[in-house]
Image: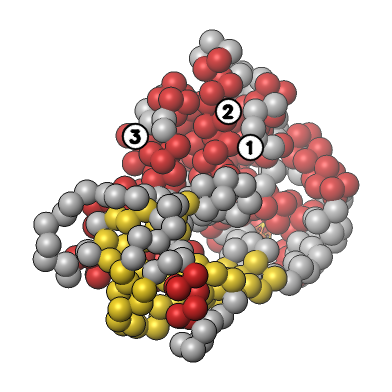
Amino acid sequence: MENSLAALSAPLLAWYRASARALPWRQTRDPYRIWVSEIMLQQTRVAAVLGYYARFLAAFPSVEALAAAPEDALMKQWEGLGYYSRARNLQAAAKRIVAAGGVFPGDYEGLLALPGIGDYTAGAIASAAFGLRVPAVDGNVLRVMTRLTDCHDNIGDPAAKRAIRAAVAAILPEQPADLRQFNQALMELGAVICGPGGPPKCEICPVKTLCLGHARKTAENLPVKTAKKTRKMQEKTIFLLEKGGKIALRKRSDSGLLASLWEFPNVEGALDEENAPAAVAAWGLHAKCWRKKLTAKHIFTHVEWHMTGYSLEVSGAGPADFLWVDAAGLSRCAVPSAFAKYYAEAQTLLAAETAPAQGETT
Ligand code: SF4
């Protein structure tokens, strides 16, 4: 990599200490709390994480509490954050830590060996919690570093990432107090000044005099990365089946997308009004009153769901794996945000029911 980055640390840390956002996970050295924040922040904005973080730690205040949590309680805390495998990996790692005596691994390799912890997360925990001289290179840091050094390598290439990681490792400060904050400061710069999606705010950047991308006017076009693969489109038909003041849910398969979470019964394909009744009949249910059609879309990383939905009143027992829930039962089940529109409609439907809650039946 070009450019001498040796002078970066002093102005970066001075800026960070004066201006960084006071985020709760920066006020602690507890590896458990730092770890939970790092996992939540993967693929998720800080503003969206704050509330979840506080509630999660209130529900599971220690690694032991997380290890012992029932799956449904864990998923309920994660409901709406998406990428649910993160929560499962958190718990799998917590169980492993507890089984090994409850002591959090205090070294980079030990952290890296835990489920759900990669290079970046291990580096972030090792430096922030244990003061180890390890880089933490996330998307923010990749962007800042390529701009600072006017690097045009494709950051989708593992070799380019390794080179950037080595460049950060070479400029980590010696002092423990500085070291704990350096990785955070680089990420903060990438989050609030040298951000994605739009020109960097070079005019207020604390390190602009050191920045080759700024001097050469290339920063806005960096980093270079290969275009993302186009997402697969899937059509689904969702059914809000209401019977006696209760709505049908069923559990998703225990592997794959949104594994083991609750969903409204659905079938593949976009069924029109003519064909939807056959799907309901195939569950052994009789459609008494079709109420509403509701369409929705949800975008995952690799797939888009295009959903056609029907709200209707039914009679009949239905399949054994359907769980018929009232409003209280619905609130206890973790239903992913992909179904948010149908969840809101189900809440409205159930709130309108005047019959007293009878509890759940299957
Ligand atoms: Fe990013 Fe501009 Fe600062 Fe360079 S000067 S690090 S491009 S904000």
**Residue 173 visible here:** no
**Which disc number belongs to residue 300?**
none
Lower sequence index among marks 1 and 3? 3
**Which quarter of the frame holds ligand 1?**
bottom right
Q: Amino acid at mark 3?
A: Ala
Identify the image quadrant of residue 257.
Answer: bottom right
Q: Residue at x 70, y 26 (%)?
A: 113
Residue 3 placement, left or right of 241? right
- Look at label 2 and name its amino acid: Ala
Q: Are marks 2 and 1 in contact (CB under 8 Å)?
A: yes
Q: Tell me which label, 2 or 3, sits earlier in the chain.
A: 3
Per the image, the residue denoted by label 3 is 59
Q: Residue 336: in sight, yes or no?
A: yes
Left or right placement of residue 9 versus residue 166 in this view: left
Q: Nearer the viewer, residue 29 or 249?
A: 249
From the top left corner, tell me how far across and down residue 19 is, in percent.
Answer: 46, 48
> Residue 62, relative to residue 199: is it above or below?
above
What numbered label is drawn on residue 93? 2
Q: Position of residue 290 (x, y in %)?
A: 33, 82
Q: Answer above or below: position of 119 versus 296.
A: above
- Please report the residue visible at 58 percent of the width from the left and 21 percent of the height from the top: 96
Q: Residues within 10 Å of mark 2 (few under 14, many from 20)?
A: many
Classify mark 3 as within 8 Å of ligand 1 or not, answering yes or no.
Answer: no
Spatial separation of the CA atoms under disc 1 and disc 3:
21 Å
Mark 1 and 3 residues: CB-CB less than 8 Å, in contact? no
